Image (cartoon, rainbow, N blue to C red):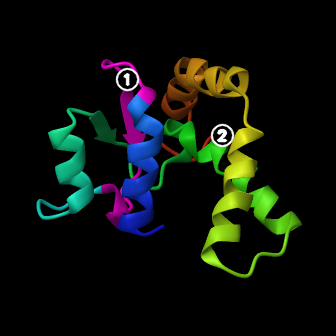
Amino acid sequence: MTQKVYLELLRIECASWPSDAVLEEDRDSAHGRSDSNPVRTWKEEHHLLHYFNCTHSPDLSPIENAWQAPKANLRKFTYHDEESLYEVAKEGWKGLSQKTINAWVDSMPIRLQAVIDAKGQITGF
């Protein structure tokens, strides 16, 4: 994902978020890790609370589960330009229910215990 696409996504999606919402992000460069990144600047200017999760850690990052919905949808359809790719991916995200997202978030205590029990090794989440 490019910074331009991610910034547009933030502008559209975060407008309706409550002021105490927190965005969890991985360490993708488009997410605004560097000081000069326009995405980082936008998040700071709009007081968007966010944090970067553990690198390469699906055990501690429920958002990693969410990527399966749009990826599966992309595999079902043919797309030839950026606009149709965007629409197909968006349809995949729409297929992800809030109930499912809540279950992933609620699974964090179990995930943390699994990491402790596995002494920091992969747990299967």
Q: Is residue 21 magenta?
A: yes
Q: Residue at x 48, y 67 (%)?
A: 1
Assign the C terminus to one quadrant of the image.
Answer: top right
Can residue 123 be seen by looking at this rendering? yes
Q: Nearer the viewer, residue 122 or 5?
A: 5
Question: Which residue is most to the right?
Answer: 76
Instruction: Give residue 53's position: percent from left, percent from top.
Output: 37, 43
- Disc assigned to residue 9: none
| 22 relative to 37 in the view: left or right | right
Instruction: Give residue 71's position: percent from left, percent from top.
Output: 72, 59
Instruction: Give residue 40's position: percent from left, percent from top.
Output: 22, 52
Residue stretch rendered in magenta on the structure? 16-31
Q: Name the residue carrying label 2.
A: 125
Q: Name the residue carrying label 1.
A: 21
Q: Is residue 23 magenta?
A: yes
Q: What is the crowding at mark 2: few (fewer than 14 residues within 10 Å), some, or many (at least 20)?
A: some
Q: Give the mark nearest the N terminus, 2 or 1.
A: 1
Q: Nearer the viewer, residue 123 or 56?
A: 56
Element carrying mark 1: loop
Q: In the picture, residue 37 is in which quadrant?
A: bottom left
Question: Which residue is most to the bottom?
Answer: 80
Depicted 107 relative to depicted 57: above or below: above
> Could you give the CA–CA distance between mark 2 and mark 1, rounded to whole angstroms?
24 Å
Q: Nearer the viewer, residue 117 or 72?
A: 72
Element carrying mark 2: loop
